Amino acid sequence: MGSVSVRARTDVASVTPWLAPIVWEGTFDSTLIDSIYKQQNITIATTVFALGKYTRFLKDFLESAEEHYFVGFRVHYHLFTDQAEEVPNVKLGQERYLTVKKVPSMNRWQDISMSRMEILEKLIENELASEADYIFCLDVDTKFYGRWGVESLGRLVGVIHPWFFNVPRFIFTYERRPESQAYIPAGEGDYYFTGAAFGGSLEDVHHLTKTCREQMNIDIANSIEAIWHEESHLNKYFLYNKPSKLLSPEYLWRDISMSSGQVKIIRLSHVAKNNAEVRPNL
Ligand code: UD2
């Protein structure tokens, strides 16, 4: 037997009841897992949206991603913005690419957030099939502080929301009105996932984005908006289409200044922001 540098974590669950791994520091050997994926010559498409004042987050997001995100692997960032002239010039490493795409401005932050599903659906359909193997869709008001690597790859990947990883299910902020397509009845649901980061294979993420877009359109036709917008629809989707891999809140933490015993490494963290100041509406 070879040497094993990984010991099971006993303070957190590292597998779901449907036997999907939950990735925490200490549950994988980064050198080993890198060497496995190195042989596969993969490309990871990464989408990020920065409309209005959110372009201010791009510099830190991109610079920190170059330091920590899939280092040594081919990454193609697809950046959607209504202000291409505000995109900072960040030096990218070898085999790292950035494409800027123009999207129309919108007056409500909720619409910006929700519209991402349809734009991603179309991006996968029209462009990515021949150029990427995996895709991750990330919020821009974030910054990397630690490794986010190939241990995160899987067919369908969700990230446990940093405010809900250690609370009972009745606290989860699922959509509770049966009139919405995002409705999840009390007593159902496994985890509460963040809308700020998700990913997987092109095929699975295409199905996810298409389904959420369709469900949101039904809601619009019925004059209802889910409590947490596309995040509510994402949670509904994951209830009936179980993720094949879950990432712990290390992969999207609340704020770098907040600590938690179980989170040994903060890999990606939200940037503290003044919502009233950066958003186009309240
Ligand atoms: C939560 C979710 C977010 C989304 C949202 C929907 C977490 C941690 N975050 O974040 O993913 O599900 O709720 O209610 O769960 N954007 C712009 N310009 C704007 C407004 C938004 O580019 O003027 C983009 C940007 O990429 C941003 C994303 O939309 O990262 C989500 O908006 P947010 O970060 O303001 O939403 P927030 O923090 O409530």
Image: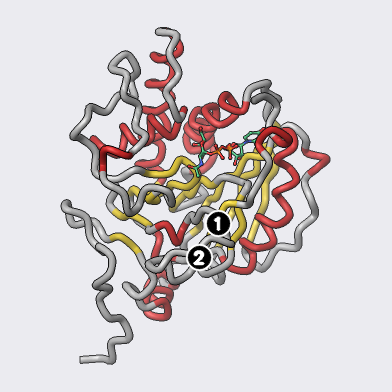
Colouring style: secondary structure
Please name the residue shown 49% across and 51% down the image. Answer: 132
Q: How many labels, in total? A: 2
Q: Disc 2 marks which amino acid?
A: Ile
Q: Establish if 98 lies above or below 29.
A: above
* Front residue of 71 and 4: 4
Please name the residue shown 31% across and 49% down the image. Answer: 167
Left or right relative to 205: residue 118: right
Residues marked 1 and 2 touching at CB (< 8 Å): yes
Quick one: which residue is furthest to the right in this view?
85
Left or right relative to 173: residue 277: right
Residue hosting label 1: 269
Left or right relative to 8: residue 26: right
In the rendered view of the protein, which quadrant contains the C terminus? top right
Q: Disc 1 marks which amino acid?
A: Ser
Q: Which mark is residue 266?
A: 2
For mark 1, give the secondary structure: strand
